[in-house]
Image: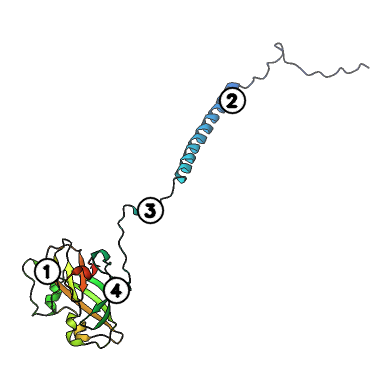
């Protein structure tokens, strides 16, 4: 018996059959290169915006001082224990302060609550016998809420309970006038003071019709020098 020869893998030769073709490595490297470029672009753009975002977050916050530098501040009404004296001590509209009234023979706590810069029609409608303002003039009206802190209130002369002068922005002085005003029946001269001492007052002034809102209302008790009165900003 003849032994079986060992099996030897067949090798392709030019005389037998062709070798299988190798895949091209060129397209593989091109693909890898394209992917690398795309990844670089994505990372680059993302990094750019990420850095910009971080830079934006790192900007210092706006402080109150920066926001208020160009914004004018409006004084707030206040409550005083002493009478404010002179233009330098003027208080904002709506402030409350005490003032002595010789007519009422006591101290009054006053609050100027409103200035009506065009009160002519209201005053004319309040009473048909009210004299009209002169040509080119108008009425303005100051409303005061008060609390009488004295004893022995006498209603008969309460209409002149305090002196009042309006000082315009240009320094022109306008003395109070006496007219029947819209709340005539509720005012101090007519209704007197309530049980708690509170009362209402309306004080009109005649001024040029083209006057701008501003200036001061000065309250004074029989004083010739306004600088000794209580000054309140009228706007």
Q: Residues within 10 Å of mark 1 (few under 14, many from 20)?
A: many
Q: Nearer the viewer, mark 3 or mark 4?
A: 4
Image-quadrant location for residue 219 = bottom left
Image disc number at residue 28: 2
Please tell me which of labels 1 and 3 falls first in the chain: 3
* Mark nearer the N terminus (1 vs 4): 4
Task: Work out whether residue 174 or residue 142 is closer to the camera in this orientation and state it.
Answer: 174
Label 1 vs label 3: CA separation?
A: 42 Å
**Are the two marked residues, 3 and 4, in contact with CB atoms closer than 8 angstroms?**
no
- Give the quadrant of residue 98: bottom left
User: For the residue labelled by badge 3, is the local secondary structure a helix, a strand or a loop?
Assistant: helix
Residues packed near mark 2 inside 10 Å, few (<14), some (14 to 19) or many (20 plus): few
* Residue marked by disc 3: 65
Q: Position of residue 207 (x, y in %)?
A: 12, 67
Identify residue for label 4: 97
Residues 61 and 72: in front is 72
């Amino acid at each position: 018996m003849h032994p079986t020869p060992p099996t030897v893998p067949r090798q392709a030769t030019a005389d037998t059959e062709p070798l299988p073709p190798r895949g091209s490595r060129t397209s593989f490297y091109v693909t890898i290169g394209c992917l690398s470029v795309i990844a670089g672009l994505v990372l680059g753009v993302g990094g750019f915006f990420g850095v910009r975002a971080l830079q934006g977050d790192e900007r210092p916050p706006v402080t109150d001082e920066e926001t208020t530098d160009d914004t004018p501040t409006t004084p707030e009404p206040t409550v005083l224990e002493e009478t404010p004296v002179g233009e330098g001590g003027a208080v904002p509209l709506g402030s409350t302060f005490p003032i002595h009234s010789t007519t009422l023979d006591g101290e009054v706590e006053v609050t100027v609550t409103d200035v009506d810069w065009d009160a002519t029609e209201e005053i004319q409608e309040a009473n048909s016998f009210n004299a009209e303002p002169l040509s080119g003039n108008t009425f303005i009206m100051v409303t005061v809420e008060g609390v009488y802190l004295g004893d022995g209130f006498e209603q008969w002369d309460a209409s002149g309970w305090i002196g009042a002068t309006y000082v315009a922005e240009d320094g022109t002085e306008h003395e109070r006038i006496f007219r029947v005003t819209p709340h005539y029946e509720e005012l101090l001269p007519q209704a007197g003071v309530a049980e708690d001492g509170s009362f209402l007052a309306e004080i009109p002034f005649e001024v040029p019709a083209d006057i701008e809102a501003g200036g001061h209302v000065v309250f004074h008790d029989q004083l010739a020098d306004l600088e000794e009165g209580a000054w309140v900003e009228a706007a």
